[in-house]
Amino acid sequence: ESFFKNPERYLNSELELELKMLDLEKKSGSWRFYMGDASRNKISESLELDADKFPDGPGHLSIGTLYRVRFKCLKGERSSGNLLLSIMPADSGPQSTISR
């Protein structure tokens, strides 16, 4: 079953998904990524990811772009408690843009 249907089943799990960036917001000392499920043609499910480390800033990331995202689900929810571990363009090789 997918993370978007039952996020509670993935509590304390590390996941890697292909997601489309919907928005990005700077919070006090961190960043919040709003990502959409890109497995279907339309974005019907979204996920919020937090990143406290972003060495070069997010200037090279683009809203509307598909990314391969690795994250830790800390609360079993889509709207909070998801820690971004790595993000890279979906069509890129093994180098990540951000990594812990």
Image: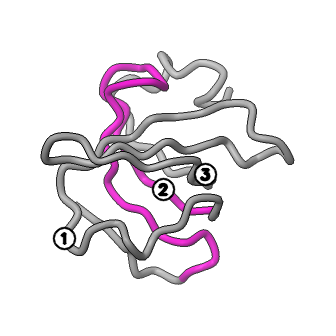
Q: Nearer the viewer, residue 48 or 100?
A: 48
Q: Position of residue 96 (x, y in %)?
A: 38, 74
First of labels 2, 3 by sequence position: 3
Name the element at disc 2.
strand
The segment highlighted magenta reads: 66-92
Name the element at disc 3.
strand
Determine crowd level at label 2: few under 14, some 14-19, many 20+ residues with C-alpha closer than 10 A: many
Name the element at disc 1.
loop
Which residue matches tag 3?
Answer: 19
Q: Specify the quadrant that holds the C terminus.
A: bottom left
Q: Nearer the viewer, residue 62 or 73?
A: 62
First of labels 1, 3 by sequence position: 3
Q: Which mark is residue 69?
A: 2
Q: Which mark is residue 55?
A: 1
The answer to whether the residues at label 1 and label 3 have Cβ atoms under 8 Å apart is: no
**Gap between marks 1 and 2 measured at Cα:** 17 Å
